[in-house]
Amino acid sequence: MKYCAFLRGVNVKGTNMKMADVCQVFKDAGMEEVSSILASGNIVFSSDKKVEDLKRILEKAMSERFSYEAFLFIKSQEETEIFWNSIPFEKNENSHIYAFVGMPGVENILMEEFQKATQTENEKAEIINDIFYWQVSKGNTLDSTFGKVLGKKSLKDQLTSRNINTFEKILKKMN
C-alpha cells in the first residue's frame, strides 16, 4: 500500500535534515519506493505494515538517526486524496490554504482555538471530513493570532500542517 508520512517540525527551528538522508532512514526501516516531496518532510513510500506499526517504527528510526523527538503522521493514498478533494475554499492568488494532518479529534481543538482568535481579513476555517482547513491572507500566516497558536508546545505531537499545493504534489508522486 502507498502512504505519505508527514513529518512535524522538519527544517525549522534548528531541526535540519536533508531529504535524501530521511529517505535513507525510511529505506533502512524496510520501506519501499521511498521518495520525498519538498524539504518540509513529506515522504511517499510503500509498505505492507499496519499504520500503527509504521508510525512506531519510523518515529523511532527518525529519532535515533537525527537525535530529536520525531513526530509523524501517516496517511494512505486514499486518505491523502480526501485532503485534496475536500478543500472548502476557492483557491486565489491572495490567500494560502492549509490542511492539518493529525491525531483524531485535533480538528475540534483547532476550531476552538480559531474561534477564540482574532481573525484577519479573509481568514476562515472549516472542518470537512474531520479535516481542519484554514485560509489566511498571504503574508499573515505567522502574524495572525491563530497562526501563533500553532506553535504551542501542547500541540506539537498532535498535528502538522501543509499548504494545499503540497497535497497536489504528493498525490502526483503517489500516482
Image (cartoon, grey):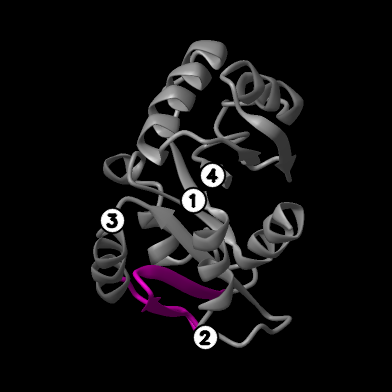
Identify the residue under disc 4: 6
Q: Amino acid at mark 4?
A: Phe
| Residue at 71% over, 21% down | 21
Q: Amino acid at mark 2?
A: Asn
**Cα separation between marks 4 and 3:** 15 Å
Is there a contact, CB below 8 Å, between mark 1 and mark 4? yes
Q: Amino acid at mark 3?
A: Pro
Structural crowding at the residue carrying mark 2, measured as other residues with C-alpha within 10 Å and reported as few (<14), some (14–19) or many (≥20): few
**Cα separation between marks 1 and 4:** 8 Å
In the image, is residue 72 above or below residue 121?
above
- State which mark lies toward you, 2 or 1: 1
**Cα separation between marks 2 and 4:** 27 Å
Q: Secondary structure at mark 2?
A: loop
| Residue at 47% over, 44% down | 74
Give the image location of residue 123, x and y in percent: 48, 80
**Cα separation between marks 3 and 1:** 12 Å
| Residue at 23% over, 69% down | 112
Identify the residue under disc 1: 75
Say which quarter of the image contains residue 124. bottom left
Q: Amino acid at mark 1?
A: Lys
Structural crowding at the residue carrying mark 3, measured as other residues with C-alpha within 10 Å and reported as few (<14), some (14–19) or many (≥20): few
Position of 31 with respect to 130 (left or right) is right
User: Which numbered disc covers residue 122?
Assistant: 2
Is there a contact, CB below 8 Å, between mark 2 and mark 1? no
Res 41 visible: no
Give the magenta-colored segment's residue range.
Answer: 117-136
Res 29 visible: yes
Identify the residue under disc 3: 104
